[in-house]
Image: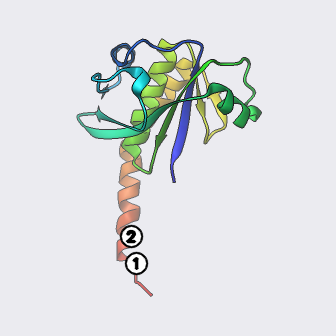
């Protein structure tokens, strides 16, 4: 199962280096590869998070399509641009995507659409959500490891 969030904005950043500056300004321990143009983002974006490898899919999508698909969210305006973030079950990939989306929304004066919660997050709400995930990450990873150990010890039919 994959998860998705979207950053919707009226403007696009000029480069991944500008995006990285926004990430750094937010104080996130996330490093994007700046060796490609922002406009070329399609698919897996390998990144460094908290000193280790992580990644998420990142693509430019049609903002109108997203707003029509999630119309029940109640958009207060028509956004022009959409940057899509998708990841699987890895908790660090989730954190990385939230950090990247939150920083992008701050820099581009946009919002983050959290599809799981079905709501729009203003830039500072998205930053707080990313910080909350970061704070909860050790406990979530511990709980996941514990569940996996119990599953491994379970008798097989």
**The furthest residue to the front:** 40
Whether 96 is drawn above or below 88: the answer is above
The residue pinned by badge 2 equals 150
> Where residue 122 sits in the image (x, y, percent)?
59, 20
- Would you say residue 153 is visible in this rendering? yes
Whether 42 is drawn above or below 157: the answer is above
> Where residue 16 sits in the image (x, y, percent)?
36, 19
Residue located 37% across and 42% down the image: 92
> How many residues crowd mark 2 within 10 Å: few (<14), some (14–19), many (20+)?
few
**The furthest residue to the left:** 51
The circle on residue 154 is 1
Query: Which quadrant is home to the C terminus?
Result: bottom left
Tag 1 secondary structure = loop
Tag 2 secondary structure = helix
> Where residue 128 sits in the image (x, y, percent)?
50, 25
Taking the image as shown, residue 82 lies to the left or right of residue 16, namely: right
The circle on residue 63 is none
């Amino acid at each position: 199962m994959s998860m998705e969030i979207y950053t919707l904005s009226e403007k696009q950043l000029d480069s991944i280096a500008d995006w990285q500056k926004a990430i750094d300004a937010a104080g996130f321990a996330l490093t994007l590869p700046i060796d490609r143009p922002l406009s070329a983002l399609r698919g897996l974006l390998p990144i460094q998070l908290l000193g280790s490898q992580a990644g998420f899919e990142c693509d430019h999508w049609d903002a109108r399509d997203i707003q029509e698909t999630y119309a029940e969210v109640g958009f207060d305006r028509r956004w022009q641009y959409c940057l899509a973030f998708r990841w699987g079950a890895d908790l660090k990939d989730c954190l990385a995507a939230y950090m990247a989306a939150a920083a992008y929304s701050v820099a581009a004066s946009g919002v983050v659409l959290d599809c799981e919660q079905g709501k729009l997050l203003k830039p500072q709400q998205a930053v707080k959500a990313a910080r909350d995930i970061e704070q909860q990450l050790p406990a979530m990873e511990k709980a996941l490891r514990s569940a996996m150990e119990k599953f491994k010890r379970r008798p097989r039919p």
